[in-house]
Image (tube, rainbow, N blue to C red):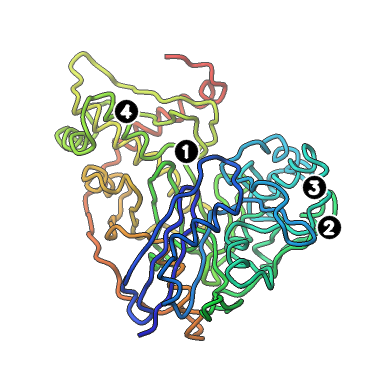
Amino acid sequence: MTYVLGIDSSTQSCKALLVDAATGRIVDEGRSTHPAGTQVDPAAWISAMDRATAGLIEQADAVSVAGQQHGMVPLDARGEVIRDAMLWNDTSSAPQAAQLVEELGGPAESASLTGSVLVASITGTKLRWMRDNEPDNAARTAAVVLPHDYLTWQLGGRKELTTDHGDASGTGYYCPWQRKFLPQLAAQYLGHEVTLPRVAEPNEIVGTTASGAAIAAGTGDNMAAALGLDLQPGDVCVSVGTSGVASAISDHAVADPSGLVTGFCDASGKYLPLACTLNGAKVLDFAAMLLGVDHSGLSELALAAPPGANGVTLLPYFDGERTPNRPNATGMFSGLRTDTTRADIARAVVEGLLCSMFDAVETIERVTGSPAKRVLLIGGAAKSEAMRIIAPQIFGVDVVVPEPSEYVALGAARQAAWALSGSATPPQWSAAGTTVYTGDHDPLPVQRYQRLRDMTEDFQALGDLQL
C-alpha cells in the first residue's frame, strides 16, 4: 500500500491527512493548533507540524505542504528567521500597499504586472513595510519565503528554497502571464536585491524527508482546496467561513484593474481567479444571537419564511466589505414593518449573505468571461440547511455540497500522489459524497439586494450613515 501525507498549515492550526495514494481514501489524520495573532514565529509552525504529523509522516511515501498564503518569512544569510512572520491578515502595510500601487503606475498596471492590485495582505507590501519601519531587519534580509516554502524547506533538511506557481502568484512580485518571479519588484519593495525560492512545477519532487519520503512542491491553501475538490472549468467554489471566497479554474491568466479579483495561478498549471468578501458565517452568528436561537433554529426560521422574506432585505457589510470595496460600510436592514416576523429577519439574513457571495461569483464570471455552470458550497456556513436550500434560488445554478472534509490537506495529499506517480496529470480519486441542491432562480431577493447595495454606495463608502 502506498500512502501520501497532505499537510494544511493554516492561520489557526496544522492539519495532516494520511491518504491512500491510489484511491484518495483517508487512512489517518492529526492536528495541532497555531498561536493566535497576525505576526507569528515560524518555529511555532514547525512544532505544530511535528505534532500533527507524528506517527503519520513515517508511513508516507510522499508529502506535500499547503500553507496560508501571503505570509512574509524573512531569512538572513544563514537561513535564520529575522523576525516573526507577518501573516496575510496583518494590515500594517496598508499605507505601503497604496504607495506601491502608485509606484507601479496605478491599479491597472499593478494588475497587469502581478495579477493583483496590491493590498495589505500581499507579501510584497510587507517587504516595503519592513523597509520603512525596520530598516535594520530589511538590510539583513537575504531571502524571503512564504509559509509553505519555509515548511517544505525544513522538511527537506534546509537544502533548497522552493515554491510553486500558485503560492508565488500571491506575492506581488510574480507575473502570472510569464509564470515567473519578477525579482526586480521584490528588490524595489525591500530596497535591495533578495534571494527568492526556485519555482517548481506542480508535479515536481523537490526533496526528501529524513524518513525518505518524497517532498512535492506544495502550494497555497486556496490552490490546494481547489485541487482537493477537483474543481473543473465551469465550477465556482464558494467557501463561506469567517470570510467568503469565490474561486474558479481558468485556462488563462486574468487581470482585474478594479482589484476585486486576484489573478492567482492554481496548483495544476492553470489559473485560479479569486474574489473575497469580508463577511461570511459571522453574519449567521450575529443573526442567531439577535434572534436568540442556535444555528439549527436560525435555519428553521429562515425556511419558514417565503422567498424574498416579505420584503425584508439585509446588506451584510457588518465589518466593511471588499466585494464591493467599501471598507467603512456597515450592515443594514431594509423593508422592516410592524408585521415583520423573526422568520422574515432570519430569511433576509441568509438571502443577504448569499447575495453578497453572488456578487463575488458575478465578479469572477465578469473577469473570466465564463458563466458558472454549478456552484460548490463549502465552509462552516455550508452546514446550514437554509443556506443549502436557498443557495440555488440566489445563484441560479445547481449547488453541490461536498461531504465535509479537510480539502486543503486533501489537495496537498493529491499533489503528493501526483508527484510520486510521475504522471502528467493529477490522480483521479473517487469523489467524496455530495448532495446536489436545485431550485428555480428567484430574481426578486437579488434585485432588492442590488438596489439597496447601489443606493447606499455613496454614503456607505464615506461611512457617514448611522442607524
The residues bearing labels 4 and 1 have C-alpha atoms spaced at a distance of: 19 Å
Q: Residue at x 33, y 59 (%)?
A: 374
Mark 2 lies on residue: 193
Q: Which residue is mark 4?
A: 313
Please name the residue that numbered disc 3 is placed on.
138
* SS at circle 3: helix
Give the residue at x 69% y 60%.
174
Q: Is residue 424 above or below residue 443?
A: below
Secondary structure found at label 1 = loop
Label 2: few (<14), some (14–19) or many (≥20) C-alpha neighbours in 10 Å: some
First along the sequence among labels 1 and 2: 2
Q: Earlier in the sequence, mark 4 or mark 1?
A: 1
Q: Residue at x 52, y 20 (%)?
A: 459
Quadrant of the image containing the C terminus: top left
Q: Mark 1 — residue? A: 278
Q: Amino acid at mark 3?
A: Ala
